């Protein structure tokens, strides 16, 4: 089982715990499946040397916890489970996130870019709520601004629409850079990827309901653009 598959198992386990504690199916309807899922997760976590964050081997044990009175609301139970599961899920995702083959993912040599790439991964691992996930989006945008400033030359890379970009207009600067370095219709996908990544980062920082998955996608999109530009610029050459 891969780390990502284990994350899916743990998220399913968490979803069943949420369901029975917030007016969903009865425990007897889900308990058999839950215990199978629990056993699988426990085994896979043990193989990785990771402590199982969930002490409730069946849903009746979980009922004893949330029914004791100190988790009176549905929201308090959801929050309790999120705080219990999320650190381990983040740990599993970080085992593989951003580890492409060979030298892709190594420092680019652009100090500010490398510094912020390291910071967004650190912030993602530590993020626990919507405000934290929004902050990840802001840092992703700052990373792309630093990247665009590192490669953009207004003489060599005229903008597509003729508008002179501001110092923080990462989208326009990267588009100009990619249009020259990756010209033609055959490279449109790469150019579109960079534009979409900037849009994703900007959207996330304003999303009041930002989630871990959205933040993780934003981090992956941002670091992907960094790697694309590093490759194009020759910084990944052997």
Image (spheres, rainbow, N blue to C red):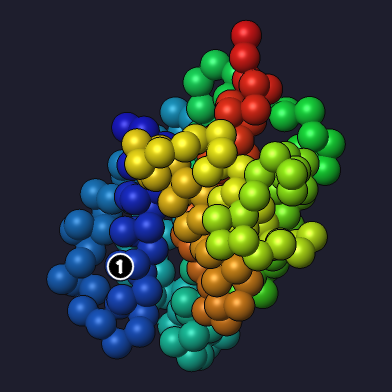
Residue 34 is left or right of residue 167, and the answer is left
Q: Residue 199, relative to residue 66: is it above or below? A: above
Classify 10 Å Cα crowding around label 1: few (below 14), some (14-19), many (20 and above): many
Confirm whether residue 81 shows in the render: yes
Determine the residue positioned at 58% across, 26% down.
231
Image coords of residue 74 (percent x, y): 44, 87
Secondary structure under badge 1? helix
Image coords of residue 36 (percent x, y): 24, 49
Residue 167 is left or right of residue 90, and the answer is right
Instruction: Choose between 203 and 19: the one closer to the eye.
Output: 203
Query: Which quadrant: the N terminus?
Result: top left
Instruction: Choose between 22 and 161: the one closer to the eye.
Output: 161
Confirm whether residue 223 shows in the render: no
Quadrant hosting residue 128: bottom right
Give the tally of numbered discs.
1
> Farthest left residue?
29
Residue 100 is left or right of residue 130, and the answer is left
Quadrant hosting residue 184: top left
Image coords of residue 176 (percent x, y): 60, 49
> Farthest top residue?
238
Q: Which residue is mark 1?
A: 16
Image coords of residue 41 (percent x, y): 37, 44
Quadrant hosting residue 204: bottom right
Determine the residue positioned at 26% across, 58% down.
34
Instruction: Choose between 200 and 129: the one closer to the eye.
Output: 200
Query: Which quadrant: the C terminus?
Result: top right
Determine the residue positioned at 35% across, 84% down.
22
Determine the residue positioned at 52% across, 63% down.
200
Q: Residue 230, relative to residue 65: is it above or below? A: above
> Farthest bottom residue?
73
């Amino acid at each position: 089982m891969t780390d990502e598959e284990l994350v899916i198992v743990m998220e399913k386990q968490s979803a069943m715990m949420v369901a029975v504690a917030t007016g969903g199916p009865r425990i007897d309807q889900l308990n058999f499946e839950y215990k199978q899922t629990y056993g699988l997760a426990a085994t896979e976590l043990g193989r990785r040397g990771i402590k199982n964050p969930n002490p409730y081997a069946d849903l009746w044990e979980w009922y004893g916890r949330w029914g004791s009175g100190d988790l009176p609301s549905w929201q308090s139970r959801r929050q309790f489970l999120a705080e219990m599961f999320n650190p381990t899920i983040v740990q599993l995702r970080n085992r593989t996130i951003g580890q492409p083959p060979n030298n892709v993912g190594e420092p680019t040599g652009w100090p500010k870019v490398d510094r912020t790439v390291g910071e967004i991964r650190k912030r993602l691992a530590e993020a626990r709520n919507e405000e934290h996930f929004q902050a990840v989006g802001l840092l992703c945008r700052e990373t792309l601004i630093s990247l665009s400033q590192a490669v953009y030359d207004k003489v060599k890379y005229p903008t597509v629409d003729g508008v002179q970009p501001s110092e923080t207009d990462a989208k326009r600067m990267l588009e100009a850079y990619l249009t020259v370095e990756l010209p033609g219709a055959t490279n449109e996908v790469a150019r579109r990827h960079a534009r979409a990544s900037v849009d994703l980062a900007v959207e996330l920082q304003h999303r009041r309901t930002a989630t871990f998955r959205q933040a993780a996608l934003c981090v992956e999109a941002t670091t992907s653009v960094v790697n694309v530009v590093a490759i194009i610029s020759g910084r990944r050459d052997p």
